[in-house]
Image: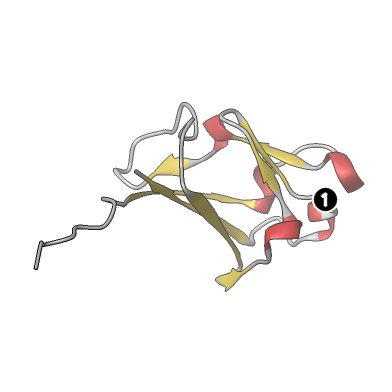
């Protein structure tokens, strides 16, 4: 029987706060440069290719319809009503 190895997945994590966002309502967004990468360095961009991502607001995993992400921003419609100190954590699963 052959050995089958699944795809290799790794993760990239980024953290910021809701107060780093701009805009209101549907246009509320946080720039990638407002995040700190898992390495402790300032982030410059989010991964361009990834299997999926998880968004945690205040430590709570959010559903897929809560946000959209590009390499430069994450948009969280209605995120402007969050407490400015609420932690925003992004976890990308990359191949």
Q: Quadrant of the N terminus?
A: bottom left
The colour mode here is: secondary structure
Does residue 89 show up? no
Considering every residue shown, the one lying at the far right of the view is 25
Q: Percent position (x, y) of residue 74? A: 66, 41
Q: Nearer the viewer, residue 89 or 1?
A: 1
Query: Which residue is disc 1 drawn over?
Result: 77
Q: Is residue 5 above or below residue 46?
A: below
Q: Is residue 42 left or right of residue 27?
A: left
Q: Nearer the viewer, residue 70 or 2?
A: 2
Q: Residue shown at 74%/58% (left/top)?
A: 66
Q: Is residue 53 left or right of residue 65?
A: left
Q: Percent position (x, y) of residue 75? A: 73, 43
Q: Is residue 40 left or right of residue 21?
A: left
Considering every residue shown, the one lying at the far front of the view is 1
Does residue 54 show up? yes
Q: Residue shown at 18%/60% (left/top)?
A: 4
Q: Is residue 51 above or below residue 47?
A: below
Task: Give the structural element (helix, strand or loop) at label 1.
Answer: loop
- The part of the image, by quadrant, that contains residue 60 is bottom right
Q: Residue shown at 85%/39% (left/top)?
A: 27
Q: Quadrant of the C terminus?
A: top left
Q: Percent position (x, y) of residue 32? A: 56, 34
Q: Residue shown at 49%/34% (left/top)?
A: 46
- The part of the image, by quadrant, that contains residue 41 is top left
């Amino acid at each position: 029987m052959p050995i089958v190895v699944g795809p290799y997945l790794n993760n990239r994590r980024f953290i910021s706060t809701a107060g780093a966002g701009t805009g209101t309502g549907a246009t509320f967004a946080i720039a990638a440069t407002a995040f700190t990468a898992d390495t402790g360095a300032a982030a410059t961009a989010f991964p361009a290719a990834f299997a999926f991502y998880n968004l945690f607001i205040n430590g709570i995993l959010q559903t897929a319809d809560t946000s959209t992400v590009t390499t430069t921003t994450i948009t969280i419609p209605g995120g402007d009503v969050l407490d400015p100190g609420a932690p925003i954590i992004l976890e990308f699963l990359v191949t």
